[in-house]
Image: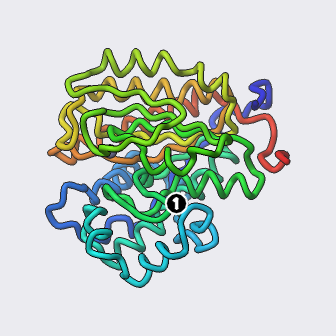
Amino acid sequence: MPNILSFLLPLGRQRLSYVYSPEYWMWPTAKHVFPVKKYRMVYERLASRGARREDFLKPRPATEKDLLLVHTPKYLRKLKTGGLSHAEATALELPFSPDLVRFAFLSVGGTVIAAEQALRCGLAVHLGGGFHHAFPDHGEGFCLLNDVAVSCLKLKVERKIQKAMIVDCDLHQGNGTASIFSRQGFVFTFSIHQMDVYPAEKPPSTVDVGLWSGDGDEEYLSAMNAYFPRLYREFAPDIVFYLAGADPFVGDQLGGLKVTREGLRERDRIVIENARRLGIPLTVVLAGGYAADVEDVVAIHLNTISVAQKTLRRFRILPSRPPASHS
Ligand SMILES: [Zn+2]
C-alpha cells in the first residue's frame, strides 16, 4: 500500500497528462450511435482551455506481444486479416474496417501509456479507452480489444505493480473484463451498472452493483459511497483504472438510469479524490456515452477531467515508492 507520507511536489509544478491520438476520430461511423467525434471534441476543448501541446501523449498501436497477454492469436489474426465471420462482425455492432481495427490497437496503446504515466505522476487521463466488452477470443458491444485488461497484465508481467483495481462506472456491466480476471486475484473488478440492459449475461466481477431502470443520483451515489474509499483501503491496489462512462446519464439513448451531470461529477469525485487521498495512482479512461446530444457526452467527460485536474492540484501527493521497486 503506498504510503501517503511520501513526498510533496512543489506547488504549481504538476500538470495533468492526457493521452490522445488524432486518429481516434478518423474511422467513419456515419449516423451510428457511437459518437466517435467526442474524442476530438474533448481534445479541442481541453486545448482551448489552456492545455499545452506537451500535456498530450500520443499513443502507438499496441504490440502483438502485449495484446497476446489477453487475446488469442487466432482472434488477433482474424482482426488483422479481416477474417471475422459474419456473426463475429455483427456482434461488434460497429461497421468493421481496417480503420476500426487500427483504432482498437491505438486505444490499447493509449491506455498502456496512460497507466505508465499514472504510475509516474499519480494521475493520467486517456481521452479514449474503456472497451470492457472485449473478451480474449471475440469482441462485442462496440469493443474489439480490452485496453484496460491488456494494461493491467502488462504492468503485472513487467513487475511494475502487484495488484490493480478496475472501477467500472460505465452504464453497462464490464462482462469482458470480469471474465478475463475471474481467476486472477491480483485484479479487483468493481462494476456498477444497469441490470436490465446489455449484456444479458453478466459474468461476476469481484463486486457487482446492479441498478435498475429509473434509478438516479440517490441510488447511484449511496452505492458508491458504501464502497469507496473502503475497497481502496481493503484491497490496497497499486493502481486504479477508472472507466468514467457517461452513459448512466439521464439523457442517454442506450440506458435507463437517471443520473444527472452533477451526480456523475460527484461519482468522479468519490472515485478520483479517494484514490488520491490514499496515494494510489489512477488512470481515467472515458468508456461509453450515447446521449442524443453529443455535447452532453463531451460535457460529462470534461467534468471528469476537471475533477482530476482539481484533485491533482488539491492533493499534491505521489506514491511513496517508484513502481519498479515492486518485485
Ligand atoms: Zn456503456
User: Is residue 234 rendered to the left or right of residue 176?
Assistant: right
| Total number of numbered discs in the rendering | 1
Which residue appears at 64% of the width and 72% of the height?
65
Q: Farthest residue to the bottom: give it.
A: 81
45 vs 21: above or below: above
Which residue appears at 14% of the width and 62% of the height?
31
143 vs 235: above or below: below
8 vs 36: above or below: above
Residue 50, percent from left and from top: 44, 47
308 vs 198: above or below: above
Residue 157, percent from left and from top: 73, 57
Q: How is the image coloured?
A: rainbow
Disc 1 is placed on an element classified as helix
User: Is residue 273 rendered to the left or right of residue 8?
Assistant: left
Disc 1 designates what residue?
A: 110
Quadrant of res 81: bottom left
Q: Give the crowd class for mark 1: few <14, some 14-19, many >=20 residues within 10 Å.
A: many
Which residue appears at 54% of the width and 69% of the height?
72
Beta carbon at label 1 within 8 Å of ligand 1 = no
Which residue appears at 64% of the width and 38% of the height?
281
Q: Front-most of 133 and 44?
A: 133
The picture quadrant for ligand 1 comes to top left
**Which kind of residue does numbered mark 1 sit on?**
Gly
Residue 320, percent from left and from top: 79, 34
Residue 229, percent from left and from top: 57, 21
User: Is residue 195 rendered to the left or right of residue 270?
Assistant: left
The N terminus sits in image quarter: top right
Q: Front-most of 245 and 199?
A: 199
Q: Front-most of 104 and 277?
A: 104
